[in-house]
Image (spheres, coloured by chain):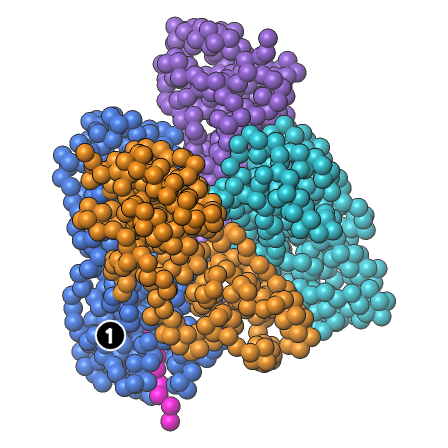
Chain colours: A orange, B cyan, C purple, D blue
């Protein structure tokens, strides 16, 4: 009797989730596993939104943004009663393994479920790059490209108007999106939890840029860094000689067809997760460490510090 | 002695302004006119930011967003004293003709200057498509594509989260950007000055969409239609069954490499403006009427109603 | 009893065909018509690939390239026997009206069928812009943007290598794609059926460009203009001082998500076609004339000369 | 007296070369080095195309494709006489260090020059990912995205026509571009030097795909794998049930604005190269090994085998 494996997506969606779903299901079928897909995250387990998935179920999705399985918030999941019910539902179908594609929160859900006899594997997918056990999450590269293209457009118009554009990007509690996109765009200032100039330094820097006859200034800010960004904007207008505008890039950072790199990463991690199951390994999350596929226990709960971050901040400081 | 013609850009920048500058300068040179470029709009005339421009001045700019000549706000321009000074400065260089690339406000500046003996021609460029004397402005097509790509990205993530995305687009006092982009994106609701469902109708429509099991809803709103969009968002969350988020696309709508269509339009209007000068016609603005190049007196001050608008609203109503 | 209307796509595919299918079906349903979709063009009528189509049949397709209905070559269609069989099959379903989305060849098929009692309407869709009765076909604008983006990329690399890139674009027997994309890209030379410099002039022009210290040269050529483009390439390398390479853009010109403008055009033409049926008008093709929706008898068989072409060639000559 | 460092680009151009030039010059200035830029590769040294470079020399280039320094073929460089002259020219300016951005050939030139007393550092930049001492070259990621977008467009039209598209990509002697882009696009077959199914297997695979009712087939082929791709195309048409077309993507793979990832990589490698000079290390090439910045002697002459390749081929086999 063949192994029965289900896959779901959970948490905020990220480009490349569909490529990961495809990789899990196709490589599972390559092992003659019986594959299932669950809609709407953990809630779908409770609500029995579980379907059998064959090759064609994942045809023509590798290039699509979002997740065909949808996701949902479901905080009630952690109640013992609910977890028990979820495990029962899965067992009713004969499903012994669950692959969860998402972020830290999704891993916690998976771990809680593993206590009830379901074998779980986590695949990291979120644009924020804030998941433990991996240097890079599925979706991060696409979001960087989306931000970079948006900033390149804002550059045109900032430059025409002698303007300082203050661009707010996502990142949850980490600055990866701000630091990498700021480096990619060659902006004048990056403000993130890990790289946090004082307001005085910000104003001073912009003043100097203006004195050096720059046509415009670009500032990238991680979300949640200021009580009210408008206060900073007003100071910039008053003190630096630039006009200033705030641009909140918003949720379009989460969308779009995944980049080549994210699709390849999704393929690698999806196949690796299924290879682990075939080798009898479970209750782990998979990821890239030093550019190689690795796995670690899913209950570990801290984001490994990005070992490239210190080096990146050196780059930022040298190029500013 | 050859005719001396200057060109400037004014008002908000728009993709395709550079292609228009290039067309004006190259076709002027084809007539053996002596061509000048003025930086920073009307203020540049007063501040003598005037340079001679040859073929290479406009090399490799046709594909760039923004305007290499920059623009600036300069409300003081309308004072008699300033206008007189501006005309004198131009005459000092021997410049008899000024081509102004911009919107309605730019046309008013040009007309005021024409009273002081400078022959002027207006070329319509703004993403808002709100300039008299033309069915289409330079920059409108690119902005539509930019909005459409952004909405396609938001569609991915809205659909993953059973969400209603309320997307605010520009347009100044007109709904062209909302109506055309909403049609292009096949959104569920368009709210613009010309197409303004009541709040009750909005809620009712979204309720029905949700009952019909749509995975998400997309609403496009022209800027300045609501006191506070958050009130609408809150009602949607409370009454329709959708989650809801507001996305303000912001100034990235103004940037980016111009679309093929905008570059061709800029080329056609730029060449036509110079052809008019060669034929002794001035104090006009140029545009597309019924798809053909036309000119009309620049002092006319009302936007011609878009003759396609009624038909477009029929399309919107049939396809919703 | 409600009117029964079918829609099919035929000939080469074009971006925006799906948006047109959606517009036809949704606006048909708005009139309470019963709508059908036929797969694989005229062959699908014979092979009974006919399905009933509701609102959701066309959900989430407005942004997709290609055609969900597929197309097929089917030269046998013109045999009396086959046409008779096709008309019978449609009548079996009660289908009285057929909307055909495609080019000239598709119109001929529709006209032939109309002789057998089926009421037909043609909607022009092809990237080549070579269909009678319209100034612009669905797909043309997207193809222009695709070519323009490709040429902008080739510009980077041509410029790095002091190279003349000879870029072959589609267009069938007409030069619209070459002339408009060449204008949009500001290339040095355009070679099309309507604008055909001699080989001597080509070489002379490139020589002069090189003497004027240009970093690179860009030439756009319509397909089928030279026995063997390699001969031209070899002469350029030998005589002009530039290195030279041929780039055949190929069928990627036919693909991609449709531009905003093509989606709006598809919506307008699709709704208009159905409006005509509702008003008892048939055996016509629809199109844009002077920027307005118009229809004419479908049996007319010559492409209306593009009235903008002479003006465009003036633009090209002034800006070269 | 400050250290004098020059930078040049050589070989085929790659997106991100400008970002690397910017990083080298800005971080050199951060060390108070005196920075020089050399135009047209090694030939520029002989022809004295050497200029002093300050901060603004590299303003607004981070997002541009190609190389502002141009490149040139210059096989004569390896003659002793020429190398001696080159070293003398550099010494005339006081230049002691040369940073060469390019591929293997560029490294050989740099190494030859190092024998004449110039200290050299190599930075790997080519779309082919075929440079020793690094897992990833600058330009590879952008080229992958360009190929992926092109294939996504071809997918639309292939699918509309029941066609097998045979897509030829670059890669020089290595299959990295084919293997990664093929994985990213989820194509049906990848043919590269490292992954080379026989013609029988190719035909068999496509036949099966057709029997399984696929709407289309996509095949990616590395350049130079077949005497004449048309022979394969003809067999596919005759034996598999698919129509077939060849698409040669050509040099547009080399162009375009660099991806976020390539810009960051260029920044990291550029800063690292200058950090090495500041630390007295030279005659090395820099790269990423296991995701970390590393350097090795520039005279080493073999491409390190991509350690991920075997794993990637496992992914390809599981997902096909």
Q: Is residue D158 above or below residue A292?
A: above
Q: Position of residue C60 (x, y in %)?
A: 49, 35
Q: Position of residue B18 (x, y in %)?
A: 58, 57
Q: Residues within 10 Å of mark 1 (few under 14, many from 20)?
A: many
Residue at the disc numbered 1: D295
The reply to whether residue C100 is visible in this rendering is no
Residue sitting nearer the eye, C236 or D29: D29
* Residue A225 as seen in the image, left or right of residue B230: left
The reply to whether residue D31 is visible in this rendering is yes
Instruction: Report the span colored magenta.
Output: D1-8
Q: Which residue is rendered at x = 63% and y = 66% of the image? A: A228
Name the quadrant containing residue C282: top right
Residue sitting nearer the eye, A89 or C106: A89
Q: Is residue C24 above or below residue A146?
A: above
Q: Position of residue B242 (x, y in %)?
A: 57, 41
Outermost residue on the right side: it is: B80
Disc 1: host chain: D
Q: Position of residue B92 (x, y in %)?
A: 75, 71
């Amino acid at each position: 009797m063949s192994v029965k494996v289900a896959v779901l997506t959970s948490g905020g969606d990220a480009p490349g989730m569909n490529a990961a779903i495809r990789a899990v299901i196709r490589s599972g079928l390559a092992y003659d596993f019986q594959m299932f897909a669950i809609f709407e995250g953990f809630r779908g387990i409770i609500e029995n939104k579980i379907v059998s998935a064959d090759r064609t179920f994942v045809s023509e999705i590798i290039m699509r943004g979002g997740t065909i399985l949808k996701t949902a918030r479901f905080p009630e999941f952690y109640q013992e009663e609910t977890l028990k019910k979820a495990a029962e539902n899965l067992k009713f179908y004969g499903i012994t393994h669950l692959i969860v594609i998402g972020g830290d929160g999704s891993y916690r859900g998976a771990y809680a479920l593993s206590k009830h006899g379901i074998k779980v594997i986590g695949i990291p997918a979120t644009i924020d790059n804030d998941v433990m056990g991996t240097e890079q999450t599925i979706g991060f590269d696409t979001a960087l490209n989306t931000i970079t293209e948006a900033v390149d457009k804002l550059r045109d118009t900032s430059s025409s108007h002698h303007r300082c554009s203050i661009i707010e990007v996502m990142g949850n509690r980490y600055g990866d999106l701000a630091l990498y996109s700021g480096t990619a765009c060659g902006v004048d200032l990056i403000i993130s939890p890990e790289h946090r100039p004082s307001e005085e330094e910000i104003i001073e820097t912009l003043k100097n840029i203006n004195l050096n006859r720059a046509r415009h200034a670009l500032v990238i800010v991680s979300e949640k860094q200021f009580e009210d960004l408008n206060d900073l904007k007003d100071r910039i207008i008053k003190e630096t000689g630039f006009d200033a505008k705030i641009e909140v890039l918003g949720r379009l950072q989460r969308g779009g067809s995944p980049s080549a790199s994210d699709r390849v990463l999704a393929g690698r991690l999806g196949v690796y997760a299924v290879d682990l199951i075939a080798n009898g390994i479970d209750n782990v999350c998979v990821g890239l460490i030093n550019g190689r596929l690795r796995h670690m226990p899913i209950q570990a709960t801290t984001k490994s510090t990005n070992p490239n971050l210190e080096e990146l901040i050196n780059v930022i400081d040298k190029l500013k």
